[in-house]
Image (cartoon, rainbow, N blue to C red):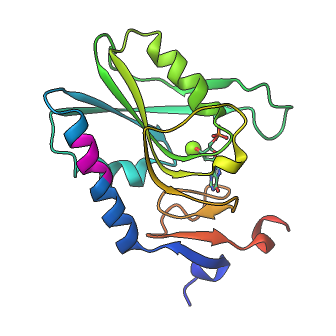
Amino acid sequence: MNNLAKDLDRVLFTEEEIAARVRELAGQITRDYAGKEVLAVCLLRGSAVFFADLVRKIDLPLIFDFMALSSYGGQAKSSGSVVVKKDLDTDLTGRHVLIVEDIIDTGRTLTCLKQLLAHRGAASVKICALLDKPSRRETPIEGDYIGFTIPNHFVVGYGLDFDQRYRNLPYIGILSPRIYQR
Ligand code: IMP
Ligand code: MG
């Protein structure tokens, strides 16, 4: 077994399963936005891998941009607010914004971000997330396009990290609790 895979309890979605689902999502997006130009927003760093695969399967006029947020989830008592660490360079006025996220967990990040972007004059703001953990939700937000709905496991790979590692795994797996409990 290779170095990264030994830290997993099991594989949740293989490369093939992810690729098939990404193709389906891109097809749905292509149909829904027919006749429009999309601004795809990649939320760094977790969605970078998903984003690169997704945009290449969307058959529409499309531009993309990047954004990085940090939330006060862990250390300080969560205030539910997010801080913009790297902002978009694109003027959103009249644009159809598609936020691409790795996973919706508590929903705090996307609740704040959706409001922020809508206030910048976007014509529409929708969310595409590869994974969704609805059992963890603290704010009532839903993705418009969801790859897979999963139970409350900590997952890594295909962009998702633990302590910045495992993002380069080409598939998604459940991280063994012994890794984050030590
Ligand atoms: P929330 O929805 O505001 O709680 O934040 C979602 C963010 O938490 C995601 O973008 C991930 O960075 C991180 N996250 C949540 N669950 C997981 C997981 O299972 N593995 C890796 N990162 C996760
Ligand atoms: Mg993230």
Measuring from the top left, give residue 13's x and y in whole percent: 48, 71
The answer to whether residue 179 is above or below residue 95 is below
Measuring from the top left, give residue 87's x and y in whole percent: 47, 23
Left or right for 20, reference 36: right
**Of the pair 18 and 135, the residue shown nearer to us:** 135
Left or right for 146, reference 93: right
Q: Which residues are magenta?
A: 25-30
The answer to whether residue 169 is above or below residue 64 is below
The residue at the point 68 percent across, 31 percent down is 139
Measuring from the top left, give residue 3's x and y in whole percent: 59, 81
The residue at the point 42 percent across, 49 percent down is 48
Q: Examine the image and state in which quarter residue 90 appears.
A: top left
**Of the pair 69 and 142, the residue shown nearer to us:** 142
Q: Examine the image and state in which quarter residue 70 appears.
A: top right
The residue at the point 64 percent across, 45 percent down is 105
Residue 69, magenta (yes or no): no
The quarter of the image that holds ligand 2 is top right
The answer to whether residue 119 is above or below residue 140 is above
Magenta stretch prevailing secondary structure: helix
The answer to whether residue 28 is above or below residue 123 is below
Measuring from the top left, give residue 122's x and y in whole percent: 36, 15
**Of the pair 131 and 182, the residue shown nearer to us:** 131
Give the quadrant of the N terminus.
bottom right
Give the quadrant of the C terminus.
bottom right
Left or right for 38, reference 89: left
